[in-house]
Amino acid sequence: MFASPRLENVESVAALLREHDIEVKITNGRTYRGAIRGNFSYRELPDPAEQPAVWVVFSDDQPKARELLREAGLLDSGRSPTSYLPTPSVHQLRGDDADAEDAAKRRAFRIRAALFVGIAIALGMSLLSFRKPVAPSAASSAATPAPTADAPQAPEPTYVIATPKALAALLIEAEIEAQTAVRPIERLCLSIDGETPTGERLAAIRLPKGMAARPTADCAGDPMPAGALSIAVSEYRTDGSGRGTVRLDLIDPDKDGRPRTDARTLAVKREGERWRVLRVVQ
């Protein structure tokens, strides 16, 4: 009925079908989970026969299952139900119990981290040939006294400054890409450093065609508007070296319309005119 290289996608589809009283089973599940955690790569996809897949146990349930997948945007009418449909998610379909929601949230963290790492690797490879370390001269080495072991250096002070336009654009574009792979964004609200982005900042962000940014107030409320996504970038802290940390907050509605918040702090680094994410600090 459905197959994917990512076990998380298969489990989410299985949960959706079980919520509608359709009995399913998952093949290539447990052992495949261990594989994708450490070595998963879209460049080296596994054999289709070894991919995790969801199977409907009773044939009478198959029409209903296909209809549910079509409504969720996971199955086209002209494609085979066993074909691969990429559905990377930041917020996947969730069950009713809190444990399932916590597990889905942790998977979303990992997906975002993988996306950031992929961007960082691509930028690093493109800049590698242009950045060569300069060997220190013998004269400068002799003139510079070596620091003594008993004199620890104080850490450089850090300051909160305006988030650079290119850094904010990188984070916002990555979150929009991850979210639209799960479901359409009907209302996008942006905030940079606690304010609605100016026209100059919006010009640096590549929004999907037909999508417009709104103030965060347009996505507020309980229940939250369906299909809304609020992204806030703030608190860029640096010592002036081109390295620092930045805070990223995401708010979207759960299945009952209640707003749920996903916040983290990222370590970032500027390389030329571009930025890359080093790791998730918190």
Image (cartoon, helix red, strand yellow):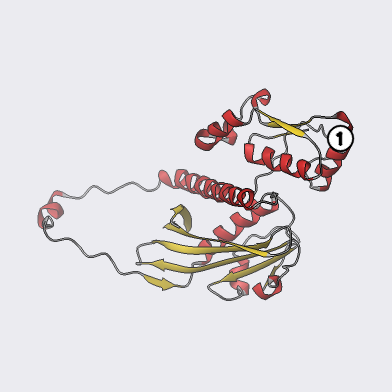
Q: Is residue 72 left or right of residue 166?
A: right
Question: In this rendering, is residue 247 above or below 42?
Answer: below
- Taking depth in this image into account, of 140 and 239 the one nearest to the observer is 239
How far across and down, in percent of the image, does residue 32 sit?
Answer: 59, 30
Secondary element at image label 1: helix
- Quarter of the rendering containing residue 251: bottom right
Q: Residues within 10 Å of mark 1 (few under 14, many from 20)?
A: some
The amino acid pointed to by label 1 is Asp
How far across and down, in percent of the image, does residue 168 sit?
Answer: 54, 64
- Taking depth in this image into account, of 242 and 219 the one nearest to the observer is 219
Question: In this rendering, is residue 267 above or below 25?
Answer: below
Question: In this rendering, is residue 160 above or below 209?
Answer: below
- Taking depth in this image into account, of 138 and 45 the one nearest to the observer is 45
Can residue 272 be seen in the rendering of this structure? no
Q: Residue at x 81, y 41 (%)?
A: 21
Judging by the rendered image, the residue that carries numbered circle 1 is 61
- Quarter of the rendering containing residue 260: bottom right
- Taking depth in this image into account, of 227 and 272 the one nearest to the observer is 227
Q: Residue at x 65, y 45 (%)?
A: 88
How far across and down, in percent of the image, does residue 26 sit?
Answer: 69, 31
- Which quadrant would the C terminus be assigned to in this image? bottom left
